[in-house]
Image (cartoon, rainbow, N blue to C red):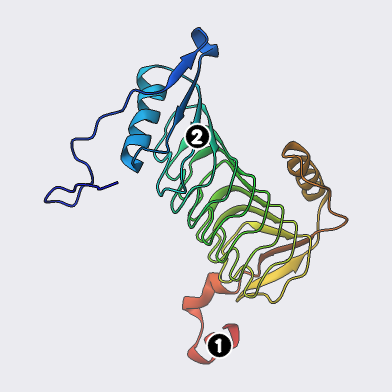
């Protein structure tokens, strides 16, 4: 498929929603399905927005997404979206409210800057999953790549498998639940929040320390795994900020070397 760009670099500036979705039911129970195999990224998103915003359909299924990038981004209303296939980079970013179920894999930066809602991925996810996440739940049933939840500011990330290096890098708020193993540099330069790991930790990052689990932690872990149908883990370890970097600017040069 040949994509046309205007002078500003905007892809398909004259694209229109293809109006191919099949809508069934009446009222709030209406459901829509459309096949995205022959559509461009812009056409897919225009059709999705037409259904959600203009037709008022709250349950949309996208078939054959073809691992295209930037699908289902910027949806700012409560609805249910099912994607029957895999996505490329930056899927489901900048959303506020929808519940999205991806029945496949995803590339880099899924659910980046999500404000609220739920994104569930049945298989694996690439690096930077949940980057700058602000709210809601991001659930990956398989493994994730490096830097999961980088600069996370809220919400919860749940990983049923293992996570790569630098997981929780610069975590500011929120929680991460990793059921499997985690690569090196866990929680490097984290400021707040908590990371729970059910498997082995290769190494801790700067200013990341282990803490005792509380009854509230146990309740959270049991509830989140139960809600998303993940297998219970025999035991978790909890990691938090050691708070040494909170006062980094006030340290003498020699003291800074000891912290880092």
Between 105 and 172, the one lying in front of the other is 105
106, above or below 95, in the image: below
166, above or below 62, in the image: below
Between 177 and 229, the one lying in front of the other is 229
In the rendered view, does 15 fall on the left or right side of 46?
A: left
In the rendered view, does 253 fall on the left or right side of 123?
A: left
Q: Where's residue 242, x and y in %?
A: 65, 70
Residue density around tag 1, few if under 14, some if 14–19, many if 20 or more, within 10 Å: few
Q: Where's residue 247, x and y in %?
A: 53, 73
Q: Where's residue 120, x and y in %?
A: 61, 42
User: Callout 2: helix, strand or loop?
Assistant: strand
At horizontal 69% and vertical 67% (from top left) the residue drawn is: 182
237, above or below 71, in the image: below
At horizontal 61% and vertical 59% (from top left) the residue drawn is: 144
Between 167 and 52, the one lying in front of the other is 52
Identify residue for label 2: 63
- The reply to whether discs 2 and 1 touch (Cβ–Cβ < 8 Å) is no
Circle nearer the viewer, 2 or 1: 2
Identify residue for label 1: 255
């Amino acid at each position: 498929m040949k994509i046309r760009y205007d002078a500003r670099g905007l892809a398909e500036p004259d694209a229109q929603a293809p109006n191919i979705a099949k809508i069934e039911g009446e009222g709030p129970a209406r459901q829509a399905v459309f096949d995205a195999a022959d559509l461009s990224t812009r056409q897919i998103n225009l059709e999705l927005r037409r259904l959600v915003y203009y037709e008022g359909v709250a349950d949309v299924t996208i078939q054959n997404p073809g691992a295209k990038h930037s699908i289902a981004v910027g949806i700012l209303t409560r609805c249910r979206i099912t994607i029957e296939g895999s996505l490329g980079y930056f899927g489901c970013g900048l959303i506020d409210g929808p519940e999205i179920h991806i029945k496949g894999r995803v590339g880099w930066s899924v659910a980046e800057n999500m404000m609220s809602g739920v994104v569930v991925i049945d298989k694996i996810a690439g690096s930077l999953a949940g980057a700058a996440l602000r709210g809601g739940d991001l659930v990956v049933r398989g493994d994730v790549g490096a830097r999961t939840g980088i600069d996370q500011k809220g919400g919860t990330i749940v990983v049923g498998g293992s996570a790569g290096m630098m997981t929780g890098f610069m975590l500011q708020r929120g929680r991460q639940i990793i059921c499997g193993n985690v690569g090196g540099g866990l929680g490097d330069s984290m400021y707040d929040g908590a990371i729970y790991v059910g498997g082995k930790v290769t190494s801790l990052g700067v200013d990341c320390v282990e803490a005792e689990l509380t009854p509230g932690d146990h309740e959270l872990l049991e509830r989140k795994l139960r809600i998303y149908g993940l297998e219970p883990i025999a035991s978790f370890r909890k990691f938090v900020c050691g708070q040494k970097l909170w006062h980094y600017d006030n340290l003498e040069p020699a003291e800074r070397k000891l912290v880092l």
